[in-house]
Image (cartoon, rainbow, N blue to C red):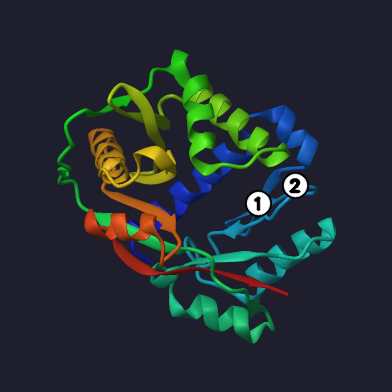
Amino acid sequence: MTAFTRAVNDNFVAAQRLWTQSDLALARRYGLVNAVRRGVVCFSAASFPEPFGDLAIGFGIHATPTRAALAAVLAYYAGLRQAPRIAVLGRLAPQAVTRLLRAAGLREAEAQHHVFVRRGRMAMRSELEPGVTIERVATGDVAPLAFLAQSGFGGRGPVAEYFTRTRIAMLRAHPRSAVAVRAARSGEPAGSGIVIVSSGAASLWSGSVLPAHRGHGIQRALIAERVRLAIARGARVCFSLADPGGRSARNLVAMGFADVGPLRVFTT
């Protein structure tokens, strides 16, 4: 297994921990926990309103995939009375992983996102339209950023509350790992994004642009700025998850990211 793949995997684990454990009151409310079984980090959610926080990450990454390791992961979820959801990071994972999962009778759920990866430490450029600015968000200013991000995604209710509160807690408590950037157009808040840097890799999350400001290159500028920040903090690879047919995927590819296949999830 390459150091490159291990870095992406370990960053994914770190990001999942931040998204599920930054606000401990919410983690207790929804039963968001994680445990390590044979080197695989098993995340689970007891009562979240929609699928979230229930992935097993790292099978076959730091150790050869074996039936014993898989049995330990399956036993963990059986003890919780939850269906396992074992993540495979596209073509980054060895083929032996998927062969073993299928041989054990697990089925592949329909993929919702693909993994997009950009290697190297060369910064990218994105030309800004007149009136568009991009800035890093200070720790003391993360609450407005969190509400801006949620406005870009839309929605309301407990799910919106969860991610708004989690963004605030994450950015305040983990400023060395999680950094937010904000875009403005003609002086008005227009979009935002978060980059999580860990294990020599960086992952791009929560990128959104308000509908009134779309079509002006803002999302690409947000991607470029997060990559720049990641490289400055030592990341040698950046990745993001996106719907392969969506606007975000097209912008990632335009900014030098390669589609390395679906985030495959195997379950019973």
Disc 1 vs disc 2: Cβ atoms closer than 8 Å? yes
Q: Is residue 32 above or below residue 63?
A: above
With 191 as the anchor, is 22 left or right in this view? right
As displayed, is residue 27 above or below residue 140? below
- In the drawing, does residue 7 fall left or right of residue 231? right
Q: Position of residue 180 (x, y in %)?
A: 40, 30
Snapshot quadrant of residue 109:
bottom right
Which residue shows up at 54% across the image and 36% down it? 150
Q: Indicate the amino acid at tag 1.
A: Phe
Q: Is residue 209 visible?
A: no
- For the C terminus, the quadrant is bottom right
Amino acid type, residue under disc 2 in the picture: Phe
On the image, numbered disc 1 is attached to which residue?
A: 52
* As drawn, 162 above or below 71: above
Q: Residue at the spot x=76%, y=59% of the render? A: 76
| Any part of residue 248 in sight | yes
Residue visible at 49% across and 34% down?
149
Could you give the CA–CA distance between mark 1 and mark 2, rounded to whole angstroms? 7 Å
The N terminus lies in which quarter of the figure? bottom left
Judging by the rendered image, the residue that carries numbered circle 2 is 48
**Label 1 Cα neighbours within 10 Å, binned few <14 / some 14-19 / many ≥20:** some
Helix, strand or loop at disc 1? Answer: loop
Residue 57 figure quarter: bottom right
For the residue carrying disc 2, how many other residues have a C-alpha within 10 Å: few (<14), some (14-19), or many (20+)?
some
| Image location of residue 131, percent across then percent down | 21, 28
Q: Callout 2: helix, strand or loop? A: loop
Which of the labelled discs sits on residue 39, or is there none? none
